[in-house]
Image (spheres, rainbow, N blue to C red):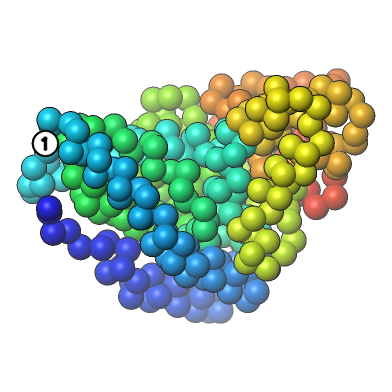
Amino acid sequence: MPHLPDAVLWSIPAFVLLTAIEMVSYRLRPDEDAAGYGGKDAATSVTMGIGSVFFDLLWKIPIVAIYTALYELTPLRVPVLWWTLPLMLLAQDFLYYWSHRGHHVVRVLWACHVVHHSSEKFNLTTALRQPWTSLTVWPFYVPLVLCGVHPAAVAFLSGVNLVYQFWVHTERVGKLPRPIEYVFNTASHHRVHHASQGGYLDRNFGGILIVWDRMFGSFVAETERPVYGLTKNIHTYNPLRVATHEYAAIGRDLAAAADWRERAGLLFRGPGWQPEHRRAAHAPDDTARTGPVATRTDPVATRAADDAPPASPPPATGAQPAAEPAQPAAEPGRRVKRAA
């Protein structure tokens, strides 16, 4: 068994120091246009992060058992060496891209990941706002184990990926030199990912590298200032509700479903999907969706734009729309910013 450090644990002092520096920077050089910090919001994010550490320990028991069983079954072995670690990290980042994308376009997976998008602020504490139900992530990394990567190495690689993404949760870092922006996930790219307005939804899923988004058509560059949060914000600082609100919404929808086909759609289709009869019978604000909604022309997401007015044209999907994009119908709690 390889002896690899816990990347997240060793990085905690750096997390604390960088967060303190960012907070001080807002005091010394405030930015009225930035989302900045909110005391209750930051406290909720930190609480979610601490809670995720304890819940992850619980989920690791069955995950380690499954990974170990699969590792023993495969005849392949990848040694942990100085030159194999970068290759394994590249493979892990590729699988992370598909895990992240899947958690945006399948509602039962989104119920886990929505926690990370629930803040209307965007700062380094937002990186700590992690789910308590991460049991949905492990299947995406089974290919690594079947290729002979030791489960301990998989955990280490996931930790490295998570640590890298800490610094991209900030508005204090602008765009970096073009070669870096082209290859790596940066603060600019990740601001787009956390935005709630039309052309930015379901974009920039990369963890360490942004080249996966460029390869698979999910990349959008930052042009207008993002509006953070969900298309229908939950307006709560209660950690328990932050962790479970989408599961509760799914439960309500399943209870009201007419048959098993509808229940399957409510679980495995996009967060905005509703059966046709419910779309016709209810106003948009009656839906339980709290996640982003994909546009009809979005090539990477499967969510239906259920809130868009029927007569509205589809929004442009490029980095800078040529005309004003269609806007979702107004509903309580929605924060959608029109493109400049």
**Is residue 176 visible in this depiction of the protein?**
no
**Is residue 65 visible in this depiction of the protein?**
yes
Q: Position of residue 105 (x, y in %)?
A: 57, 33
Give the secondary structure at mark 1: loop
Q: Position of residue 110 (x, y in %)?
A: 58, 42
Question: Residue, x 42% and y 55% (percent of image)?
Answer: 59
Q: Tell me if 233 is positioned left or right of 226 in this view.
A: right
* Front in this rendered view, residue 199 or 286: 286
Position of residue 327 relative to residue 186, above or below, is above
Q: Position of residue 111 (x, y in %)?
A: 60, 46
Question: Residue, x 64% and y 64% (percent of image)?
Answer: 240
Position of residue 173 relative to residue 153, above or below, is below
Question: Residue, x 72% and y 64% (percent of image)?
Answer: 236
Q: Tell me if 303 is positioned left or right of 155 in this view.
A: right
Q: Quadrant of residue 34?
A: bottom right
Q: Position of residue 233 (x, y in %)?
A: 73, 53
Q: Quadrant of residue 202?
A: top right
Q: Quadrant of residue 138?
A: top left
Question: Residue, x 46% and y 62% (percent of image)?
Answer: 55
Mark 1, other Cα within 10 Å: few <14 / some 14–19 / many ≥20:
some
In the image, what residue type sits under mark 1? Answer: Arg
> Circle 1 sits on which residue?
77
Q: Tell me if 69 is positioned left or right of 181 in this view.
A: left
Q: In which quadrant is the C terminus drawn?
A: top right
* Front in this rendered view, residue 127 or 102: 102
